[in-house]
């Protein structure tokens, strides 16, 4: 046999395979999304996301302690208010749901990094991510609101803010407002390449944030586009983003790879609610193995170039990393 290269040599045993692994993961790079709602004593399961819950502020510390114990480093907080209005004012109230959750979380479980989703769709009566002008979201009228929301999160103790609205210029607006108020060291993780995606369906049920008319295509990206994602990412970098994000993750790994090759800051990927729900549902039917699927999908997202992974499977992944199944 005239064959110098035998790739199978490095696959002969688990020890060699693990040594030669190209992708290394660390559970400190996992971010777990958590939903917080008004009320007392509430821990309710989200119908379309089995195993995920909405917590009232008093129940939140139990969930956070479990997350911290698993070794996951960060959480992304989403607020579900009781009251909504035209301009989403619940998003920047001192006693808003996120602000209350942050104060409690920082007090009870200070070891986690608290990132907040900066957006209006959960708080507006129309469910769109900004201020309406007729049926259109007015970009420039929305910017001061986003800046105000980010500032109020910072004041309530957020460790990082993550704008997910997809307005043009919002990273700059937020950065300037944070800086002029003394939060120049607070990082911004921008949902830079956020596509208008049907993978967000379960989230909208979880957060009650589906738009009451139309869709989000005039502000979130068209999934046919790749170069446009790089334009969005470069714009956010130039506006002062500290981390850029690609969302969703699984069907968008080409975007993750290109972003990772292009920028000199960390790239996060958000494995969204629909990705979680698909795995859950298929596993429940017995069509696939859930644990194997969790491991494979996560490793592939990191292999594509993600440095940080937002996932509803963060706790499971931390466990599998501990066990040496992946990473
Ligand atoms: C907007 C926001 C959404 C998600 C994160 N932030 C929903 C949307 O844009 O409609 C989706 C996350 C997921 O599906 O897991 N606030």
Image (cartoon, grey):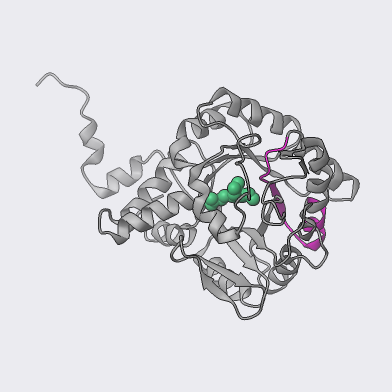
Residue drawn at x 58%, y 62% is: 34
Quarter that holds the N terminus: top left
Looking at the picture, tell me which residue is in the foreground, 210 or 11: 210
Residue drawn at x 70%, y 64% is: 81
Extreme-left residue of the structure = 1
Q: Is residue 15 left or right of residue 160?
A: left
The range drawn in magenta is 150-167
How far from the left and from the top, in percent, is residue 162? 68, 48
Extreme-bottom residue of the structure = 41
Looking at the picture, tell me which residue is in the foreground, 228 or 307: 228
Q: Is residue 245 magenta?
A: no
How far from the left and from the top, in percent, is residue 105? 68, 69
Extreme-top residue of the structure = 2
The answer to whether 260 is drawn above or below residue 98 in the figure is above
Q: Is residue 315 left or right of residue 324?
A: right
The answer to whether 163 is drawn above or below residue 45 in the figure is above
Residue drawn at x 67%, y 39% is: 166
The answer to whether 236 is drawn above or below residue 87 in the figure is above
Looking at the picture, tell me which residue is in the foreground, 218 or 101: 218
How far from the left and from the top, in percent, is residue 38? 68, 71
């Amino acid at each position: 046999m005239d064959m110098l290269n035998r790739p199978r040599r490095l696959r002969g045993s688990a020890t060699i395979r693990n040594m030669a692994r190209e992708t290394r993961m660390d559970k400190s790079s996992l971010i777990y999304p958590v939903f917080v709602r008004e009320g007392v004593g509430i821990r309710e399961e989200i119908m379309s996301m089995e195993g995920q819950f909405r917590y009232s502020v008093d129940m939140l510390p139990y969930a956070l302690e479990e997350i911290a114990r698993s070794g996951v480093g960060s959480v992304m907080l989403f607020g579900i208010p009781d009251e909504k209005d035209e301009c989403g004012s619940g998003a920047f109230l001192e006693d808003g749901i996120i602000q209350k959750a942050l104060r409690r979380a920082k007090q009870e479980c200070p070891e986690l990094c608290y990132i907040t989703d900066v957006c209006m769709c959960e708080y507006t009566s129309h469910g769109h991510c900004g201020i309406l002008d007729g049926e259109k979201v007015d970009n420039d009228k929305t910017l001061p609101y986003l800046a105000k929301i980010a500032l109020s999160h910072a004041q309530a103790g957020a460790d990082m803010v993550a704008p997910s609205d997809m307005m043009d210029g919002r990273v700059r607006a937020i950065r300037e407002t944070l800086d002029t108020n003394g939060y120049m060291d607070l990082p911004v993780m921008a949902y830079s390449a956020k596509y208008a995606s049907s993978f967000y369906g379960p989230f909208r049920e979880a957060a009650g944030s589906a738009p009451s008319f139309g869709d989000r295509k005039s502000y979130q990206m068209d999934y046919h586009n790749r170069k446009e994602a790089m334009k969005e990412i470069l714009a956010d970098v130039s506006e002062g983003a500290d981390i850029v994000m690609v969302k969703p993750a699984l069907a968008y790994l080409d975007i993750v790879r290109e972003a990772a090759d292009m920028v000199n800051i960390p790239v996060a990927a958000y494995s969204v609610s629909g990705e979680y729900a698909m795995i859950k549902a298929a596993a429940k039917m017995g069509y696939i193995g859930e644990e194997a699927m969790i491991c494979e999908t996560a490793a592939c997202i990191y292999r594509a170039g993600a440095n940080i992974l937002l996932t509803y499977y963060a706790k499971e992944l931390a466990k599998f990393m501990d066990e040496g199944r992946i990473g």
